[in-house]
Image (cartoon, rainbow, N blue to C red):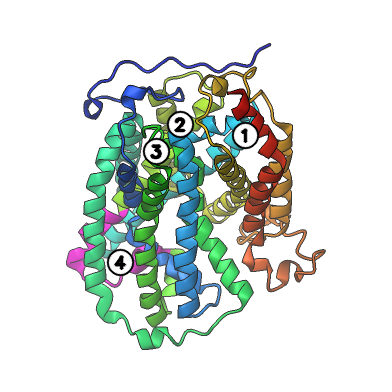
Amino acid sequence: MTDTTSAPEAGPAVEPDLQIETTGIEIVTPDKRTAKPRDLFWPWFAANVSVFGISYASYVYGFGVSLGQALLVTVVGITLSFLTCGVVAIAGKRGSAPTMILSRASFGVTGQKVPGVFSYLISMGWETFLAIMAVLATATVVTKLGGDGGTATKIIAMVVVAALIVAGSVAGYHLIMKLQSVLTWVTGAVTIAYIVLTIGQIDLGTAAQMPSGSAQAMIGALVMVLTGFGLGWVNIAADWSRYQRRDASSGAIVFWNTFGGAIAPILLVVYGLALIGTRPDLMDGIALDPIGTLADLLPTWFLVPFLVAAVLALVSGAILGIYSSGLTLLSLGLKVKRPVAAGIDGAILTIGAVWVVFFAESFLGPFQSFLITLGVPIAAWAGITMADVVLRRRDYDDAALFDGSGRYGRWNPTVIVLMALASVVGWGLVINSFAEEAAWNNWQGYLLGPLGLGGRDGDWAWANLGVLVALLIGFVGYLLLQRGAVRRQETDA
């Protein structure tokens, strides 16, 4: 039986700003490919400009590195992480379809469901986490203002946050792009004000006295930065470039994607390194309550705009994620319209956030452990997808992306085995960072001893080499094993 996944053609061009986007996983028609590469700046910048980024400086220092080492890790790590998104975004303009549909070119029309499941789980997980953080941040700041940050406040915050996320993701691409350009100015202005109000507390001389760390510590910090920023978005990167013209410059797409995503986090983490290097006493508080700890440095009159900006930034990121997870859900075979899929994911997000905020006694540690574990196969998938983009010279075959009897086939066993191998090796070189809260996840790190890296308690354990290794195995393995297959596909075209 022929494995086909068809979708109706999008209708004629309409005024996009006033319509709910109905385009789902089908190919975006030429009349709707009106975006320019520079338009990619707005969604990536808005989703990543948040005072929350300052808290990452604490996590970088947590690896025991100096100010100079931390600056190097931050600039290199964040830039490279969003560069991966920029490379994957090229696929969006070549195929005018969501990321996981384009992944069928390398995995097969049915085989794509393997990385699709991982992509869906990690997208839903991180966006639920962002919603939880937005609700808890609201309760924290309300308490600091002298109010009651208890159940009633959390319920109101949950309703508002969930409504914003669901409404934005259901409305779709055009409204999201417009909202992101507005949110950029709002969150950017408040972030600048935060810096102005707290910069007097910085003493670079004190920060420069942070002791230096080992090579393992620097690699661990680098991997944390990679996974905490761009690699957390890479599985949805082409979703925002599929409205680009096919003749748009690939270099421009990579640049605006990388620049838009990286510039704000680099500046924020660098500022955080100076601030927390001066005030290392903030590190413990940030680990437990990043928004609340950062708010402690502010005058009372600025807490309300700080709260609004922090919540909007978190919501902005969640909207992007839920929009894309809805597209991934459709790519897995759910037969509904795109807005319905986004609504389903919004409902799942809301239920998950409600459970954590109001009922779960110990959840965030195990939850984050689960998400970090999913990061290894996503890194393997990212390596494979980037290699596929590098090898191809032509646009994707639109029809074959939806037809298992086409040139991409139903399954590509070689690539699926490659992803599995990269994941198994990767999991063997990382450890569970939440060992006490998620003891069931302590099976990782099984290669650290046999490979002479000191075992789970050695210096290399916290370097989380598995993420980089999984990405490299996926990338190099695909280049070596699939070069001929890609060439045959393009020759047949």
Residue that badge 4 annotates: 295
Residue that badge 2 annotates: 326
Label 1 close to label 3 by CB (< 8 Å): no
Q: Magenta stretch?
A: 289-310
The answer to which of marks 1 and 3 sits earlier in the sequence is 1
Residue that badge 1 annotates: 106
Q: Residue at x 56, y 62 (%)?
A: 223
Residue 240 tag number: 3
The answer to which of marks 4 and 1 sits earlier in the sequence is 1
Mark 4 or 1: the one toward you: 1
Hey, what amino acid is under mark 2? Answer: Gly
Q: CA distance from mark 4 to mark 3?
A: 33 Å
Q: CA distance from mark 4 to mark 1?
A: 46 Å
Q: Quadrant of residue 250?
A: top left
Label 4 close to label 3 by CB (< 8 Å): no
Q: Residues within 10 Å of mark 2 (few under 14, many from 20)?
A: many
Residue 213 can be seen in this image = yes
Residue 460 image point, x, y percent:
68, 70
Hey, what amino acid is under mark 3? Answer: Trp
Q: Quadrant of residue 408?
A: top right
Q: CA distance from mark 3 to mark 2?
A: 14 Å
Label 3 close to label 2 by CB (< 8 Å): no
